[in-house]
């Protein structure tokens, strides 16, 4: 016999908890990386703030800010397809978007 809940409400599961936190933007890079790719892309495109992009040969790289980390999405401009993504907090990937050039 199935369990009856008040007003047909179901208990909140761990997965629901993560979705609630994601909707509010309260999750860590670690939690983001644990999510399936489909959910990572959904969050990136629907909740991420687009910051910048650059073109390198036939690839376009787009940078998004989410919560306290960044996601870089790589596009194949020839075939108009997403190739992949990388998520990070800082480092060389983020430095690529800086307007400051290395001057010796």
Image (cartoon, helix red, strand yellow):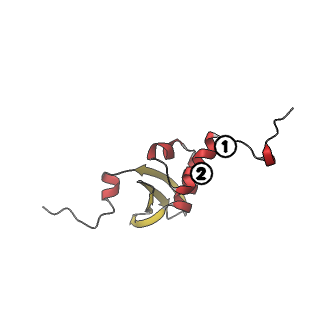
Direction top: furthest residue: 1
Residue drawn at point x = 79 percent, y = 45 percent? 6
Residue drawn at point x = 46 percent, y = 42 percent? 30
Name the residue carrying label 1.
12
The quadrant holding residue 60 is bottom left
Question: SS for tag 2?
Answer: helix
Residue drawn at point x = 70 percent, y = 41 percent? 11
| Picture coordinates of residue 51, whole percent (x, y) | 41, 66
- The answer to whether 76 appears left or right of 2 in the picture is left
- Taking depth in this image into account, of 86 and 25 the one nearest to the observer is 25
Q: Is residue 64 visible?
A: yes
| Picture coordinates of residue 69, whole percent (x, y) | 41, 53
Whichever of callouts 2 and 1 sits on the residue coming sooner in the sequence is 1
Disc number placed over residue 20 in the picture, else none: 2
Distance of label 2 from label 1 (alpha carbons)? 10 Å
Q: How crowded is mark 2: few (under 14 residues within 10 Å), some or many (20 or more)?
A: some
Q: Are marks 2 and 1 in contact (CB under 8 Å)?
A: yes
| Picture coordinates of residue 1, whole percent (x, y) | 87, 32
Question: SS for tag 1?
Answer: loop
């Amino acid at each position: 016999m199935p369990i009856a809940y008040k007003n047909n409400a179901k208990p909140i599961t761990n997965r629901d908890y993560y979705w609630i936190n994601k909707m509010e933007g309260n999750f860590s890079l670690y939690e983001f990386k644990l999510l399936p790719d489909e959910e990572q892309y959904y969050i990136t495109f629907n909740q991420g703030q687009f910051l910048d992009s650059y073109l390198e040969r036939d690839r376009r790289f787009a940078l998004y800010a989410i919560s306290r980390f960044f996601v870089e999405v790589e596009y194949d401009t020839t075939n108009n397809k997403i190739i992949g993504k990388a998520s990070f907090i800082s480092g060389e990937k983020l430095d690529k978007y800086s307007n400051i050039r290395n001057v010796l």
